[in-house]
């Protein structure tokens, strides 16, 4: 997908903004999105506690349960996190 197509898609559906808001919620929770352990570590703005969880985030798990739940909150409440 080209950058122009990606931008048009995001502008139309708000995907980028929804992901940013979901990541903010996940950061507040301070729990690894893969294994749910408490962590202060992050990678790419996402709470990930170990290299194992980073590998799973990158290559194994398409949509972690925690991310799905955060996205659902953002969609349901049109939530803005500061």
Image (tube, helix red, strand yellow):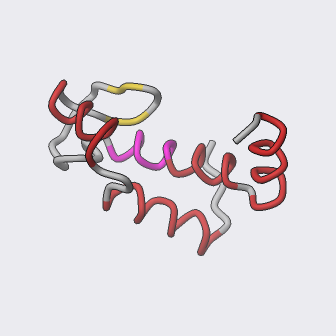
Q: Eyeballing the image, is 44 above or below 77?
A: above
Residue at far front of view = 1
Q: Eyeballing the image, is 69 above or below 54?
A: below
Question: Which corner quadrant holds the N terminus?
Answer: top right
In the image, 22: left or right of 80?
A: left
Q: Residue at x 45, y 59 (%)?
A: 70
Question: Which residues fall within the magenta stretch?
Answer: 23-29
Task: Estimate the x, y position of residue 49 in percent, counting from the top left.
Answer: 21, 31
In the image, 74: left or right of 3?
A: left
In the image, 48: left or right of 71?
A: left
Q: Residue at x 74, y 56 (%)?
A: 14
Quarter of the figure with residue 66: bottom left
Q: Eyeballing the image, is 74 above or below 60?
A: below
Task: Estimate the x, y position of residue 55 in percent, counting from the top left.
Answer: 24, 32
Q: Nearer the viewer, residue 7 or 20?
A: 7
Q: Residue at x 18, y 24 (%)?
A: 51
Q: Is residue 37 magenta?
A: no
Task: Estimate the x, y position of residue 52 in percent, counting from the top left.
Answer: 15, 31
Q: Nearer the viewer, residue 61 or 68?
A: 61
Quarter of the figure with residue 5: top right
Q: Does the magenta stretch include residue 28?
A: yes
Q: Nearer the viewer, residue 69 or 39?
A: 69
Q: Which residue is drawn at 31% across and 40% down?
A: 57
Question: Which corner quadrant holds the C terminus?
Answer: top right
Assign the magenta stretch its main secondary structure: helix
């Amino acid at each position: 997908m080209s950058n122009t197509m990606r931008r048009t898609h995001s502008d139309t559906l708000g995907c980028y903004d929804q992901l940013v808001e979901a990541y903010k919620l996940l950061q507040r929770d301070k729990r690894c999105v893969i294994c749910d352990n408490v962590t202060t570590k992050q990678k790419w703005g996402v709470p990930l506690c170990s290299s194992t969880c980073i590998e799973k985030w990158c290559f194994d798990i398409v949509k972690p349960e925690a991310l799905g739940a955060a996205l659902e909150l953002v969609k349901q409440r049109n939530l803005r996190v500061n």
